Amino acid sequence: MSKYKVTQSAVSQLLADVRREEIAIPELQRPFVWDTVKVRDLMDSLYKGYPVGYLITWQSIGAHLKGGQVAAHQQILIDGQQRITALRAAVAGLDVIDKRYRTKRIKIAFNPVTETFATLTPVIDKDPEWISDISALFTSASTFGFYKKYFEANPDVDAEVVEGNLGRLEQLKNAQIGIIQLSDDLDVETVSEIFIRINSKGVPLSSADFAMSKIATYGDRGRNLRKLIDYFCHLAIAPHAYGDIQTNDTEFQSSGHLAKIAWLKDDSEDLYDPTYSDMIRVAGLVGFSRGKASSIVSELSGRDPETRKVDEARIPVAYEKLEAALDTMVKKFHYENFIMTIKSAGFITPDMIGSKNALNFAYALYLRLRADSEMSEGERKRIVRRWFVMSMLTARHSGSFESTWEQDIRRIGTLGAAAYLKQIEESELTDGFWNVALPASLETASTASPYFQTFLASQVQAGSRGFLSKAITVASMHQQSGDIHHIVPKDYLQKNGFPDRGDYNQVANFALTETSINISVSNKPPSEYMALMAEQVESGRLSLGEITDGQDLAANLVENAVPEWLHEVSSSNYREFLAARRLLMAGRMRTYFEQL
Protein backbone atom coordinates (compact mmCIF):
# COMPACT_ATOMS: atom_id res chain seq x y z
CA MET A 1 0.00 0.00 0.00
CA SER A 2 1.38 3.38 -0.94
CA LYS A 3 1.91 5.56 2.10
CA TYR A 4 1.81 8.78 0.14
CA LYS A 5 1.37 10.39 -3.23
CA VAL A 6 3.24 13.31 -4.72
CA THR A 7 1.40 16.03 -6.60
CA GLN A 8 2.36 19.38 -8.08
CA SER A 9 0.47 22.59 -7.49
CA ALA A 10 0.93 26.04 -9.03
CA VAL A 11 1.70 28.82 -6.56
CA SER A 12 -1.58 30.58 -7.36
CA GLN A 13 -3.57 27.36 -6.92
CA LEU A 14 -1.77 26.56 -3.69
CA LEU A 15 -2.56 29.99 -2.22
CA ALA A 16 -6.18 29.64 -3.37
CA ASP A 17 -6.43 26.21 -1.69
CA VAL A 18 -5.07 27.67 1.53
CA ARG A 19 -7.51 30.61 1.32
CA ARG A 20 -10.43 28.16 0.89
CA GLU A 21 -8.95 25.88 3.61
CA GLU A 22 -8.78 22.91 1.24
CA ILE A 23 -5.25 22.84 2.60
CA ALA A 24 -5.71 23.73 6.26
CA ILE A 25 -2.95 25.54 8.09
CA PRO A 26 -3.47 24.93 11.79
CA GLU A 27 -1.60 28.04 12.95
CA LEU A 28 -1.23 31.05 10.68
CA GLN A 29 -0.46 33.26 13.67
CA ARG A 30 2.75 31.41 14.55
CA PRO A 31 5.68 33.83 14.29
CA PHE A 32 7.38 33.97 10.90
CA VAL A 33 10.96 32.98 11.66
CA TRP A 34 12.45 33.26 8.18
CA ASP A 35 14.49 36.37 7.54
CA THR A 36 13.80 38.41 4.40
CA VAL A 37 16.86 36.95 2.67
CA LYS A 38 15.22 33.51 2.73
CA VAL A 39 12.04 34.98 1.25
CA ARG A 40 14.08 36.63 -1.48
CA ASP A 41 15.89 33.36 -2.21
CA LEU A 42 12.57 31.49 -2.43
CA MET A 43 11.29 33.97 -5.04
CA ASP A 44 14.55 33.76 -6.96
CA SER A 45 14.44 29.94 -6.97
CA LEU A 46 10.85 29.90 -8.23
CA TYR A 47 11.72 32.47 -10.92
CA LYS A 48 14.63 30.33 -12.12
CA GLY A 49 12.68 27.08 -11.93
CA TYR A 50 14.73 25.61 -9.11
CA PRO A 51 13.15 23.09 -6.69
CA VAL A 52 12.07 24.59 -3.37
CA GLY A 53 11.31 21.47 -1.36
CA TYR A 54 8.05 19.68 -0.66
CA LEU A 55 5.11 20.58 1.50
CA ILE A 56 3.73 17.71 3.60
CA THR A 57 0.01 17.29 4.23
CA TRP A 58 -2.08 14.68 6.03
CA GLN A 59 -5.74 14.08 6.73
CA SER A 60 -6.10 14.39 10.50
CA ILE A 61 -9.30 13.19 12.17
CA GLY A 62 -10.82 15.76 14.49
CA ALA A 63 -8.72 18.72 13.38
CA HIS A 64 -10.45 22.00 14.20
CA LEU A 65 -9.98 24.79 11.69
CA LYS A 66 -10.29 28.55 11.96
CA GLY A 67 -13.97 29.47 12.14
CA GLY A 68 -14.84 26.42 14.23
CA GLN A 69 -15.21 23.83 11.46
CA VAL A 70 -13.87 20.30 11.86
CA ALA A 71 -11.66 19.01 9.07
CA ALA A 72 -13.41 16.42 6.89
CA HIS A 73 -11.59 16.04 3.59
CA GLN A 74 -9.12 18.86 3.94
CA GLN A 75 -5.43 18.15 3.97
CA ILE A 76 -3.70 19.42 7.11
CA LEU A 77 -0.37 21.12 6.42
CA ILE A 78 2.12 19.56 8.82
CA ASP A 79 5.32 20.88 7.22
CA GLY A 80 5.94 23.87 4.98
CA GLN A 81 4.23 26.65 6.89
CA GLN A 82 7.18 29.04 6.58
CA ARG A 83 7.22 28.63 2.79
CA ILE A 84 3.45 29.12 2.59
CA THR A 85 3.73 32.23 4.76
CA ALA A 86 6.58 33.55 2.60
CA LEU A 87 4.47 33.08 -0.55
CA ARG A 88 1.47 34.76 1.04
CA ALA A 89 3.68 37.70 2.01
CA ALA A 90 5.70 38.14 -1.19
CA VAL A 91 3.14 37.13 -3.82
CA ALA A 92 -0.20 37.97 -2.20
CA GLY A 93 1.07 40.96 -0.23
CA LEU A 94 -0.35 39.74 3.09
CA ASP A 95 1.03 40.61 6.52
CA VAL A 96 3.08 38.23 8.67
CA ILE A 97 3.61 38.01 12.43
CA ASP A 98 7.28 38.63 13.30
CA LYS A 99 9.36 37.17 16.14
CA ARG A 100 8.13 39.95 18.43
CA TYR A 101 4.56 39.05 17.50
CA ARG A 102 3.97 42.27 15.59
CA THR A 103 2.15 42.50 12.27
CA LYS A 104 4.49 43.56 9.45
CA ARG A 105 4.85 43.51 5.69
CA ILE A 106 7.68 41.83 3.85
CA LYS A 107 8.38 43.43 0.50
CA ILE A 108 10.57 41.74 -2.10
CA ALA A 109 11.84 43.97 -4.90
CA PHE A 110 12.74 42.92 -8.45
CA ASN A 111 14.91 44.55 -11.09
CA PRO A 112 13.58 43.47 -14.52
CA VAL A 113 16.72 44.78 -16.22
CA THR A 114 19.19 42.65 -14.25
CA GLU A 115 16.70 39.93 -13.16
CA THR A 116 17.70 40.48 -9.53
CA PHE A 117 15.56 39.99 -6.43
CA ALA A 118 16.30 41.93 -3.24
CA THR A 119 14.81 42.82 0.12
CA LEU A 120 13.32 46.28 -0.22
CA THR A 121 15.55 49.08 1.11
CA PRO A 122 15.03 52.88 1.02
CA VAL A 123 17.66 53.15 -1.72
CA ILE A 124 15.95 50.54 -3.90
CA ASP A 125 12.56 52.10 -3.20
CA LYS A 126 13.78 55.38 -4.73
CA ASP A 127 15.28 53.73 -7.83
CA PRO A 128 12.65 53.62 -10.63
CA GLU A 129 14.48 50.73 -12.31
CA TRP A 130 13.33 48.48 -9.45
CA ILE A 131 9.83 47.18 -8.79
CA SER A 132 9.65 47.89 -5.07
CA ASP A 133 7.08 45.19 -4.24
CA ILE A 134 6.49 42.25 -6.57
CA SER A 135 3.08 41.60 -5.02
CA ALA A 136 1.93 44.79 -6.79
CA LEU A 137 2.27 42.94 -10.11
CA PHE A 138 0.41 39.85 -8.93
CA THR A 139 -2.44 41.82 -7.36
CA SER A 140 -2.66 44.46 -10.10
CA ALA A 141 -6.08 44.87 -11.72
CA SER A 142 -4.37 45.56 -15.07
CA THR A 143 -0.96 44.19 -15.98
CA PHE A 144 -1.02 46.41 -19.09
CA GLY A 145 -1.28 49.46 -16.84
CA PHE A 146 1.50 48.10 -14.61
CA TYR A 147 3.84 47.65 -17.61
CA LYS A 148 2.94 51.08 -19.01
CA LYS A 149 3.71 52.80 -15.71
CA TYR A 150 7.10 51.07 -15.49
CA PHE A 151 8.17 52.05 -19.01
CA GLU A 152 7.09 55.64 -18.43
CA ALA A 153 9.41 55.78 -15.42
CA ASN A 154 12.25 54.03 -17.32
CA PRO A 155 12.21 55.28 -20.94
CA ASP A 156 15.82 54.22 -21.64
CA VAL A 157 15.57 50.52 -20.81
CA ASP A 158 15.48 47.80 -23.48
CA ALA A 159 11.71 47.38 -23.67
CA GLU A 160 11.86 43.93 -25.25
CA VAL A 161 14.20 42.52 -22.58
CA VAL A 162 12.27 44.09 -19.71
CA GLU A 163 8.91 42.97 -21.05
CA GLY A 164 10.21 39.41 -21.35
CA ASN A 165 11.56 39.46 -17.80
CA LEU A 166 8.36 40.92 -16.40
CA GLY A 167 6.48 38.17 -18.21
CA ARG A 168 8.71 35.57 -16.54
CA LEU A 169 8.11 37.22 -13.17
CA GLU A 170 4.37 37.14 -13.77
CA GLN A 171 4.61 33.42 -14.55
CA LEU A 172 6.04 32.85 -11.08
CA LYS A 173 2.43 32.37 -9.93
CA ASN A 174 2.33 29.29 -12.18
CA ALA A 175 5.56 27.84 -10.76
CA GLN A 176 5.06 24.29 -9.49
CA ILE A 177 5.54 23.27 -5.86
CA GLY A 178 5.56 19.63 -4.82
CA ILE A 179 3.13 18.37 -2.20
CA ILE A 180 3.59 15.05 -0.41
CA GLN A 181 0.11 13.92 0.57
CA LEU A 182 0.30 11.26 3.27
CA SER A 183 -2.41 8.63 2.95
CA ASP A 184 -5.50 9.29 5.05
CA ASP A 185 -5.56 5.79 6.56
CA LEU A 186 -1.97 5.79 7.86
CA ASP A 187 -1.68 5.28 11.60
CA VAL A 188 -0.15 8.02 13.71
CA GLU A 189 3.13 6.20 14.34
CA THR A 190 3.76 5.77 10.61
CA VAL A 191 2.94 9.41 9.89
CA SER A 192 5.25 10.47 12.69
CA GLU A 193 8.07 8.29 11.35
CA ILE A 194 7.66 9.71 7.84
CA PHE A 195 7.55 13.21 9.27
CA ILE A 196 10.82 12.67 11.15
CA ARG A 197 12.65 11.18 8.18
CA ILE A 198 11.78 13.79 5.57
CA ASN A 199 14.23 16.67 5.49
CA SER A 200 13.05 20.24 5.11
CA LYS A 201 15.77 22.52 3.71
CA GLY A 202 18.35 20.05 5.03
CA VAL A 203 17.05 20.27 8.61
CA PRO A 204 15.78 16.94 10.01
CA LEU A 205 12.28 17.21 11.42
CA SER A 206 11.65 15.85 14.89
CA SER A 207 8.75 14.02 16.42
CA ALA A 208 8.26 17.10 18.61
CA ASP A 209 7.72 19.22 15.48
CA PHE A 210 5.05 16.75 14.44
CA ALA A 211 3.42 16.90 17.87
CA MET A 212 3.41 20.71 17.79
CA SER A 213 1.64 20.62 14.42
CA LYS A 214 -0.93 18.17 15.78
CA ILE A 215 -1.59 20.16 18.95
CA ALA A 216 -2.45 23.26 16.91
CA THR A 217 -5.15 21.48 14.89
CA TYR A 218 -7.65 21.63 17.75
CA GLY A 219 -9.19 25.02 17.05
CA ASP A 220 -8.52 28.04 19.26
CA ARG A 221 -7.76 25.78 22.18
CA GLY A 222 -5.11 23.85 20.31
CA ARG A 223 -3.54 26.99 18.87
CA ASN A 224 -3.29 28.58 22.30
CA LEU A 225 -1.83 25.44 23.88
CA ARG A 226 0.80 25.42 21.18
CA LYS A 227 1.49 29.09 21.91
CA LEU A 228 1.68 28.33 25.63
CA ILE A 229 4.50 25.90 24.90
CA ASP A 230 6.23 28.29 22.48
CA TYR A 231 5.95 31.33 24.70
CA PHE A 232 7.05 29.55 27.88
CA CYS A 233 10.22 28.34 26.15
CA HIS A 234 10.84 31.76 24.62
CA LEU A 235 10.29 33.73 27.83
CA ALA A 236 12.44 31.35 29.87
CA ILE A 237 15.36 32.52 27.72
CA ALA A 238 14.23 36.06 26.83
CA PRO A 239 11.99 37.48 29.60
CA HIS A 240 11.98 40.90 27.89
CA ALA A 241 9.77 39.47 25.12
CA TYR A 242 6.80 39.40 27.49
CA GLY A 243 5.77 42.95 26.56
CA ASP A 244 5.80 42.10 22.85
CA ILE A 245 3.55 39.07 23.37
CA GLN A 246 1.22 41.01 25.64
CA THR A 247 0.89 43.83 23.13
CA ASN A 248 0.75 41.90 19.91
CA ASP A 249 -1.07 38.64 20.67
CA THR A 250 -4.42 39.66 22.10
CA GLU A 251 -5.94 36.26 21.26
CA PHE A 252 -3.47 34.46 23.52
CA GLN A 253 -3.81 37.07 26.24
CA SER A 254 -7.60 36.77 26.28
CA SER A 255 -7.33 32.96 26.52
CA GLY A 256 -6.02 33.30 30.08
CA HIS A 257 -2.81 31.40 29.35
CA LEU A 258 -0.57 34.48 29.32
CA ALA A 259 -1.36 35.14 32.99
CA LYS A 260 -0.02 31.66 33.83
CA ILE A 261 3.46 32.48 32.51
CA ALA A 262 3.58 36.21 33.29
CA TRP A 263 6.00 35.44 36.16
CA LEU A 264 8.69 34.61 33.60
CA LYS A 265 9.08 38.31 32.76
CA ASP A 266 11.01 38.67 36.04
CA ASP A 267 12.82 35.32 35.87
CA SER A 268 16.60 35.18 35.46
CA GLU A 269 17.14 31.49 36.24
CA ASP A 270 18.87 29.55 33.47
CA LEU A 271 19.53 26.13 34.99
CA TYR A 272 16.56 24.60 33.18
CA ASP A 273 15.36 26.40 30.06
CA PRO A 274 13.26 23.76 28.28
CA THR A 275 12.78 23.70 24.52
CA TYR A 276 9.36 22.89 23.07
CA SER A 277 10.64 19.34 22.55
CA ASP A 278 11.40 19.13 26.28
CA MET A 279 7.97 20.56 27.14
CA ILE A 280 6.18 18.00 25.01
CA ARG A 281 8.18 15.13 26.50
CA VAL A 282 7.50 16.21 30.07
CA ALA A 283 3.80 16.81 29.28
CA GLY A 284 3.61 13.34 27.77
CA LEU A 285 5.01 11.75 30.93
CA VAL A 286 2.85 13.83 33.27
CA GLY A 287 -0.42 13.69 31.34
CA PHE A 288 -0.30 10.36 29.51
CA SER A 289 2.54 8.30 31.07
CA ARG A 290 3.97 8.20 27.55
CA GLY A 291 7.57 8.91 26.63
CA LYS A 292 7.34 9.21 22.86
CA ALA A 293 6.08 12.33 21.12
CA SER A 294 4.41 10.12 18.53
CA SER A 295 2.44 8.48 21.34
CA ILE A 296 1.17 11.89 22.39
CA VAL A 297 0.06 12.53 18.82
CA SER A 298 -1.73 9.20 18.90
CA GLU A 299 -3.54 10.22 22.11
CA LEU A 300 -4.53 13.59 20.65
CA SER A 301 -5.84 11.79 17.54
CA GLY A 302 -8.23 9.70 19.67
CA ARG A 303 -6.47 6.41 19.23
CA ASP A 304 -7.17 3.83 21.92
CA PRO A 305 -3.80 2.29 22.94
CA GLU A 306 -5.50 -1.03 23.73
CA THR A 307 -7.65 -1.53 20.62
CA ARG A 308 -5.45 0.69 18.38
CA LYS A 309 -8.64 2.09 16.89
CA VAL A 310 -9.63 5.75 16.61
CA ASP A 311 -12.41 6.90 18.90
CA GLU A 312 -13.18 10.59 18.34
CA ALA A 313 -14.75 10.83 21.81
CA ARG A 314 -11.23 10.41 23.25
CA ILE A 315 -9.92 13.57 21.55
CA PRO A 316 -11.37 16.25 23.88
CA VAL A 317 -10.36 14.15 26.90
CA ALA A 318 -6.79 13.99 25.58
CA TYR A 319 -6.63 17.76 25.16
CA GLU A 320 -7.95 18.16 28.72
CA LYS A 321 -5.06 16.00 29.95
CA LEU A 322 -2.54 17.91 27.84
CA GLU A 323 -3.74 21.27 29.12
CA ALA A 324 -3.70 20.06 32.73
CA ALA A 325 -0.13 18.76 32.29
CA LEU A 326 1.05 22.03 30.74
CA ASP A 327 -0.63 24.05 33.47
CA THR A 328 1.20 22.17 36.20
CA MET A 329 4.49 22.44 34.25
CA VAL A 330 4.38 26.22 33.85
CA LYS A 331 3.28 26.97 37.41
CA LYS A 332 5.84 29.20 39.10
CA PHE A 333 5.78 27.34 42.44
CA HIS A 334 6.41 23.97 40.80
CA TYR A 335 9.12 25.21 38.45
CA GLU A 336 11.04 27.13 41.11
CA ASN A 337 10.83 24.34 43.69
CA PHE A 338 12.12 21.84 41.14
CA ILE A 339 15.07 24.13 40.32
CA MET A 340 15.87 24.46 44.03
CA THR A 341 15.75 20.68 44.36
CA ILE A 342 18.31 20.18 41.60
CA LYS A 343 20.54 22.94 42.98
CA SER A 344 20.37 21.36 46.43
CA ALA A 345 22.08 18.34 44.85
CA GLY A 346 25.00 20.61 43.88
CA PHE A 347 24.13 21.11 40.21
CA ILE A 348 24.03 24.90 40.20
CA THR A 349 24.95 25.91 36.64
CA PRO A 350 23.67 24.68 33.24
CA ASP A 351 27.11 23.54 32.07
CA MET A 352 27.18 20.99 34.91
CA ILE A 353 24.24 19.14 33.36
CA GLY A 354 25.10 17.40 30.11
CA SER A 355 21.83 15.46 29.95
CA LYS A 356 18.72 17.55 29.35
CA ASN A 357 16.76 14.30 29.35
CA ALA A 358 17.80 13.65 32.94
CA LEU A 359 16.35 17.05 33.87
CA ASN A 360 13.19 16.42 31.85
CA PHE A 361 12.44 13.13 33.55
CA ALA A 362 13.28 14.52 36.97
CA TYR A 363 10.83 17.38 36.43
CA ALA A 364 8.13 14.97 35.24
CA LEU A 365 8.80 12.80 38.29
CA TYR A 366 8.56 15.81 40.61
CA LEU A 367 5.24 16.89 39.07
CA ARG A 368 3.78 13.38 39.26
CA LEU A 369 4.85 13.00 42.88
CA ARG A 370 3.03 16.22 43.70
CA ALA A 371 -0.19 14.36 42.94
CA ASP A 372 0.51 12.17 45.99
CA SER A 373 -1.04 14.24 48.77
CA GLU A 374 0.27 11.86 51.45
CA MET A 375 3.92 12.39 50.48
CA SER A 376 5.76 15.20 52.26
CA GLU A 377 7.58 17.83 50.23
CA GLY A 378 10.84 16.75 51.87
CA GLU A 379 10.40 13.13 50.77
CA ARG A 380 9.38 14.27 47.30
CA LYS A 381 12.53 16.34 46.92
CA ARG A 382 14.73 13.56 48.32
CA ILE A 383 13.45 11.09 45.73
CA VAL A 384 13.85 13.57 42.86
CA ARG A 385 17.38 14.50 43.97
CA ARG A 386 18.52 10.89 44.21
CA TRP A 387 16.81 9.93 40.95
CA PHE A 388 18.47 12.79 39.09
CA VAL A 389 21.95 12.03 40.40
CA MET A 390 21.44 8.30 39.80
CA SER A 391 20.48 9.03 36.19
CA MET A 392 23.56 11.25 35.73
CA LEU A 393 25.85 8.52 37.05
CA THR A 394 24.27 5.66 35.11
CA ALA A 395 23.43 7.50 31.83
CA ARG A 396 19.91 6.14 32.32
CA HIS A 397 18.34 8.67 29.97
CA SER A 398 20.66 8.23 26.99
CA GLY A 399 20.20 5.92 24.01
CA SER A 400 16.63 4.60 23.70
CA PHE A 401 15.54 6.78 26.59
CA GLU A 402 11.88 7.11 25.57
CA SER A 403 11.23 3.40 26.11
CA THR A 404 13.10 3.55 29.42
CA TRP A 405 10.97 6.53 30.45
CA GLU A 406 7.74 4.67 29.84
CA GLN A 407 9.01 1.60 31.68
CA ASP A 408 10.13 3.73 34.62
CA ILE A 409 6.83 5.62 34.81
CA ARG A 410 4.86 2.35 34.75
CA ARG A 411 6.95 0.80 37.52
CA ILE A 412 6.81 3.95 39.62
CA GLY A 413 3.04 3.73 39.30
CA THR A 414 3.06 0.08 40.35
CA LEU A 415 5.74 -0.03 43.03
CA GLY A 416 5.87 3.57 44.19
CA ALA A 417 8.74 5.96 43.47
CA ALA A 418 10.75 5.27 46.63
CA ALA A 419 10.58 1.48 46.31
CA TYR A 420 11.41 1.48 42.60
CA LEU A 421 14.31 3.89 43.08
CA LYS A 422 15.69 1.65 45.83
CA GLN A 423 15.40 -1.33 43.48
CA ILE A 424 17.43 0.50 40.80
CA GLU A 425 20.06 1.59 43.30
CA GLU A 426 20.48 -1.94 44.66
CA SER A 427 20.84 -3.41 41.18
CA GLU A 428 23.03 -0.75 39.56
CA LEU A 429 24.83 1.25 42.25
CA THR A 430 26.59 -1.76 43.74
CA ASP A 431 30.02 -1.95 45.39
CA GLY A 432 31.33 -2.93 41.96
CA PHE A 433 29.95 0.28 40.49
CA TRP A 434 31.51 2.55 43.11
CA ASN A 435 34.84 0.70 43.39
CA VAL A 436 35.44 -0.37 39.78
CA ALA A 437 33.03 0.99 37.15
CA LEU A 438 32.92 4.61 38.36
CA PRO A 439 36.72 4.96 38.74
CA ALA A 440 37.06 3.49 35.23
CA SER A 441 34.52 6.01 33.91
CA LEU A 442 36.64 8.81 35.36
CA GLU A 443 39.46 7.78 33.04
CA THR A 444 38.60 10.51 30.56
CA ALA A 445 39.86 13.90 29.38
CA SER A 446 36.37 15.35 29.01
CA THR A 447 35.46 17.91 31.66
CA ALA A 448 31.88 17.65 30.34
CA SER A 449 31.80 14.03 31.55
CA PRO A 450 28.74 13.50 33.80
CA TYR A 451 31.01 11.69 36.24
CA PHE A 452 33.38 14.63 36.62
CA GLN A 453 30.49 17.08 36.81
CA THR A 454 28.84 14.93 39.48
CA PHE A 455 32.10 15.01 41.42
CA LEU A 456 32.05 18.82 41.23
CA ALA A 457 28.39 18.76 42.31
CA SER A 458 29.38 16.68 45.34
CA GLN A 459 31.89 19.39 46.23
CA VAL A 460 29.31 22.13 45.78
CA GLN A 461 26.76 20.30 47.91
CA ALA A 462 29.32 19.79 50.71
CA GLY A 463 30.55 23.40 50.60
CA SER A 464 34.07 22.26 49.66
CA ARG A 465 36.76 24.83 49.06
CA GLY A 466 38.79 25.14 45.90
CA PHE A 467 42.13 23.36 45.66
CA LEU A 468 44.61 25.00 48.11
CA SER A 469 42.08 27.74 48.86
CA LYS A 470 41.43 28.82 52.45
CA ALA A 471 37.92 30.25 52.03
CA ILE A 472 36.77 30.41 48.39
CA THR A 473 34.37 27.56 47.67
CA VAL A 474 33.92 25.46 44.56
CA ALA A 475 30.35 26.77 44.38
CA SER A 476 31.42 30.42 44.32
CA MET A 477 34.06 29.70 41.67
CA HIS A 478 31.44 27.95 39.54
CA GLN A 479 29.21 30.99 39.73
CA GLN A 480 31.90 33.67 39.52
CA SER A 481 35.46 32.98 38.44
CA GLY A 482 37.66 29.96 38.91
CA ASP A 483 40.10 27.85 36.92
CA ILE A 484 40.15 24.18 36.10
CA HIS A 485 43.67 23.62 37.36
CA HIS A 486 46.10 20.83 36.45
CA ILE A 487 47.18 19.39 39.80
CA VAL A 488 50.30 18.10 38.03
CA PRO A 489 50.95 20.99 35.61
CA LYS A 490 50.50 20.44 31.91
CA ASP A 491 53.85 22.05 30.92
CA TYR A 492 55.73 19.91 33.43
CA LEU A 493 54.11 16.71 32.13
CA GLN A 494 54.71 17.61 28.48
CA LYS A 495 58.40 18.05 29.20
CA ASN A 496 58.63 14.85 31.22
CA GLY A 497 57.24 12.04 29.08
CA PHE A 498 53.53 12.89 28.72
CA PRO A 499 53.15 14.89 25.49
CA ASP A 500 49.65 13.59 24.66
CA ARG A 501 46.60 15.65 25.57
CA GLY A 502 44.78 12.51 26.69
CA ASP A 503 47.42 12.01 29.39
CA TYR A 504 47.89 15.44 30.94
CA ASN A 505 44.22 16.46 30.58
CA GLN A 506 42.80 13.55 32.58
CA VAL A 507 39.92 14.73 34.78
CA ALA A 508 41.66 13.02 37.70
CA ASN A 509 44.36 15.66 37.19
CA PHE A 510 41.85 18.51 37.41
CA ALA A 511 40.66 20.59 40.35
CA LEU A 512 38.87 23.90 40.62
CA THR A 513 41.03 26.60 42.12
CA GLU A 514 41.42 30.37 42.32
CA THR A 515 43.08 32.05 39.36
CA SER A 516 45.76 33.57 41.60
CA ILE A 517 46.69 30.13 42.96
CA ASN A 518 46.80 28.69 39.46
CA ILE A 519 49.19 31.47 38.40
CA SER A 520 51.40 30.96 41.46
CA VAL A 521 51.67 27.21 40.84
CA SER A 522 52.58 27.88 37.19
CA ASN A 523 54.49 24.85 35.84
CA LYS A 524 55.93 23.69 39.17
CA PRO A 525 55.53 19.97 39.92
CA PRO A 526 53.67 19.05 43.13
CA SER A 527 56.94 18.38 44.96
CA GLU A 528 57.92 22.04 44.48
CA TYR A 529 54.64 23.83 45.14
CA MET A 530 53.74 21.60 48.07
CA ALA A 531 57.18 22.43 49.53
CA LEU A 532 56.16 26.09 49.27
CA MET A 533 52.93 25.23 51.09
CA ALA A 534 54.89 23.47 53.85
CA GLU A 535 57.11 26.54 54.25
CA GLN A 536 54.03 28.78 54.30
CA VAL A 537 52.47 26.67 57.06
CA GLU A 538 55.67 26.82 59.10
CA SER A 539 56.42 30.54 58.65
CA GLY A 540 52.95 32.02 58.16
CA ARG A 541 54.28 34.05 55.19
CA LEU A 542 51.85 33.80 52.26
CA SER A 543 53.21 32.77 48.86
CA LEU A 544 50.58 30.35 47.55
CA GLY A 545 47.01 30.98 48.59
CA GLU A 546 46.14 31.74 52.23
CA ILE A 547 46.32 28.41 54.10
CA THR A 548 48.75 28.60 57.03
CA ASP A 549 47.61 25.63 59.12
CA GLY A 550 48.76 22.07 58.52
CA GLN A 551 45.46 20.47 59.52
CA ASP A 552 43.60 22.92 57.29
CA LEU A 553 45.86 21.98 54.38
CA ALA A 554 45.22 18.27 54.97
CA ALA A 555 41.47 18.95 55.14
CA ASN A 556 41.65 20.86 51.85
CA LEU A 557 43.24 17.87 50.11
CA VAL A 558 40.45 15.65 51.47
CA GLU A 559 37.79 18.10 50.24
CA ASN A 560 39.31 17.90 46.75
CA ALA A 561 39.81 14.10 46.84
CA VAL A 562 43.57 14.54 46.40
CA PRO A 563 45.92 11.86 47.82
CA GLU A 564 47.72 12.97 50.99
CA TRP A 565 51.02 12.04 49.33
CA LEU A 566 50.64 14.75 46.70
CA HIS A 567 54.00 16.20 47.78
CA GLU A 568 55.62 12.99 46.46
CA VAL A 569 53.98 13.07 43.02
CA SER A 570 56.20 13.46 39.97
CA SER A 571 56.21 12.27 36.37
CA SER A 572 57.54 8.89 37.52
CA ASN A 573 54.45 8.05 39.60
CA TYR A 574 51.91 10.24 37.75
CA ARG A 575 49.81 7.28 36.58
CA GLU A 576 49.65 5.88 40.13
CA PHE A 577 48.51 9.33 41.29
CA LEU A 578 45.68 9.34 38.70
CA ALA A 579 44.52 5.85 39.73
CA ALA A 580 44.55 6.79 43.41
CA ARG A 581 42.67 10.02 42.83
CA ARG A 582 39.98 8.30 40.73
CA LEU A 583 39.28 6.00 43.67
CA LEU A 584 39.09 8.98 46.04
CA MET A 585 36.78 10.88 43.68
CA ALA A 586 34.49 7.84 43.36
CA GLY A 587 34.47 7.41 47.12
CA ARG A 588 33.60 11.06 47.56
CA MET A 589 30.66 10.67 45.16
CA ARG A 590 29.44 7.57 46.96
CA THR A 591 29.34 9.39 50.30
CA TYR A 592 27.60 12.33 48.63
CA PHE A 593 24.95 10.12 47.02
CA GLU A 594 24.23 8.19 50.20
CA GLN A 595 23.64 11.47 52.05
CA LEU A 596 21.27 12.98 49.47
Image (cartoon, helix red, strand yellow):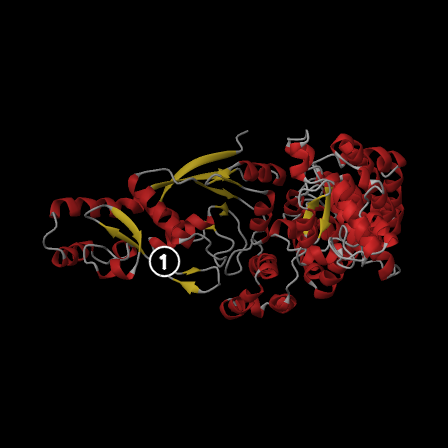
Q: Quadrant of residue 220?
A: bottom right
SS type, badge 1: loop
Judge whether 575 appears above or below 417 on screen.
above
Q: How many marks?
A: 1
Q: Position of residue 189 (x, y in %)?
A: 63, 38
Q: Is residue 314 visible?
A: no
Q: Position of residue 434 (x, y in %)?
A: 85, 38
**Residue 11 falls left or right of residue 166:** right
Q: Is residue 21 visible?
A: yes
The front one of 2 and 155 is 155
**Residue 236 falls left or right of residue 528:** left
The front one of 417 and 371 is 417
Q: Position of residue 517 (x, y in %)?
A: 70, 52
The front one of 485 and 588 is 485
Q: Quadrant of the N terminus?
A: top right
Q: What residue is shown at x 75% (from left), y 58% (from top)?
A: 472
Label 1, on which residue? Answer: 106
